[in-house]
Structures are given as C-alpha cells and as structure tokens.
C-alpha cells in the first residue's frame, strides 16, 4: 500500500513506493552514489573523510552505501565503532579489538574463578552429605 511520508532529506511530502526518500532526493542520491562509486574505484584505500572531502557527497550517504554493500568497502576506511579511528576490516580498530580481547579474557578468568568457587562449594556440600 502506498502512503504519504515526509522525505527524510528535504522534508517534503511524497508517496512512498519502496524508496526511503522522495523521487527528487532519490535521483540526487543515485547521482551521488555514482560519483562515490567511481571515486572508490579510482582510489584504492581511501577513507570516508577523503570521499566526503573530494566528492562533496554527504558522509551519511557514503556510510549508507558502505553498510548496504554498494561500495567495495575493503577499499574504504570507515570509523571504528568504539573510537572512530579509520579501519578497513571488522568493526573495531586494532587497538580496540585488543582491548576487547583483554576484556573477554578477563571475563573468562573471572568466570573460571567463579566456577572454582562453585566447585569447592559443591565438594564441601557433597562431603557433608556423606
Ligand atoms: Zn526529498
Ligand atoms: Zn577503535
């Protein structure tokens, strides 16, 4: 069913037929996507900041393209979800993934400690039952 919506880009009312913005903004976005697409093809290992600065396309458009896989993201640095540093793979930069590993290790160590406590308690109770 078609329904009237406010375009998130320009705020005008439009009839929603699948795309998330009005036809005029959709056209603009398609044009921008083409520009970004060509830019990424010609620039190996560029960052979102470079794309935005050089093409004038809005950062959120570039991000949306990367997230939806319309840009070869292995060539584009995007921000680490934790600190915002430029990264090419995964969701976190090297530093943050190391930090995360440390946290996981610590959690596991804590869990082991808890398990040991549990075990000794069980043993104690078992001994009492006998
Ligand atoms: Zn619009
Ligand atoms: Zn980071």
Image: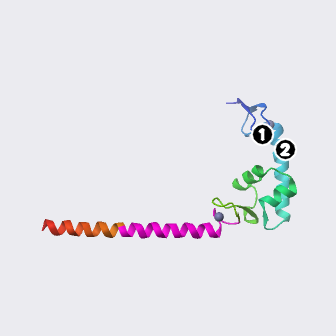
Residue at image position (64%, 70%) is 94
Examine the rendered structure and indicate whether residue 24 appears above or below residue 76: above
Label 1 lies in ligand 1 vicinity (Cβ under 8 Å): yes
User: Residue reaching furthest left?
Assistant: 130
Name the element at disc 2.
Answer: helix
Left or right side of 68 for 35: right
In the rendered image, residue 34, in percent from the top left (x then y), is placed at: 84, 53
- Which quadrant is home to the N terminus? top right
Q: Write the residue at 25% across / 66% down.
A: 121
**Relative to 103, does residue 27 appear above or below in the rendering?**
above
Residue pointed to by mark 2? 28
Q: Which residues are magenta?
A: 87-113
Q: Position of residue 10 (x, y in %)?
A: 80, 36
Which type of secondary structure does the marked residue at label 1 adopt? loop
The CA span between labels 1 and 2 is 10 Å
User: Would you say 1 lies left or right of 117 here?
Assistant: right
Q: Position of residue 23 (x, y in %)?
A: 81, 37
What is the number of the mark on residue 34? none
70 versus 107 height, above or below: above
- Residues at marks 1 and 2 touching, judged by CB atoms closer than 8 Å: yes
Rendering coords of residue 127 (x, y %)? 17, 69
From the image, tell me which residue sits under label 1: 9
Which quarter of the frame holds ligand 2?
Answer: bottom right
Q: Nearer the viewer, residue 22 or 87?
A: 87
Q: Is residue 83 left or right of residue 102?
A: right
Q: Label 1: few (<14), some or many (≥20) within 10 Å?
A: few
């Amino acid at each position: 069913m078609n329904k009237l919506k406010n375009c998130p880009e320009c705020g005008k009312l439009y009839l929603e037929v699948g795309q998330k913005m009005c036809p005029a903004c959709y056209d603009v976005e398609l044009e921008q996507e083409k520009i970004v697409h060509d830019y990424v093809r010609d620039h190996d290992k560029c960052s979102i900041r470079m794309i935005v600065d050089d093409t004038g396309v809005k950062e959120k458009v570039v991000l949306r393209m990367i997230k939806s896989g319309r840009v070869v993201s292995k060539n584009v640095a995007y921000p680490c979800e934790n600190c915002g540093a430029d990264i090419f793979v995964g969701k976190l930069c090297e530093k943050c993934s190391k930090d995360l590993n440390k946290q996981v290790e610590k959690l596991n160590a804590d869990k082991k400690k808890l398990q040991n406590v549990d075990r000794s308690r069980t043993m104690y109770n078992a001994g009492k039952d006998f």
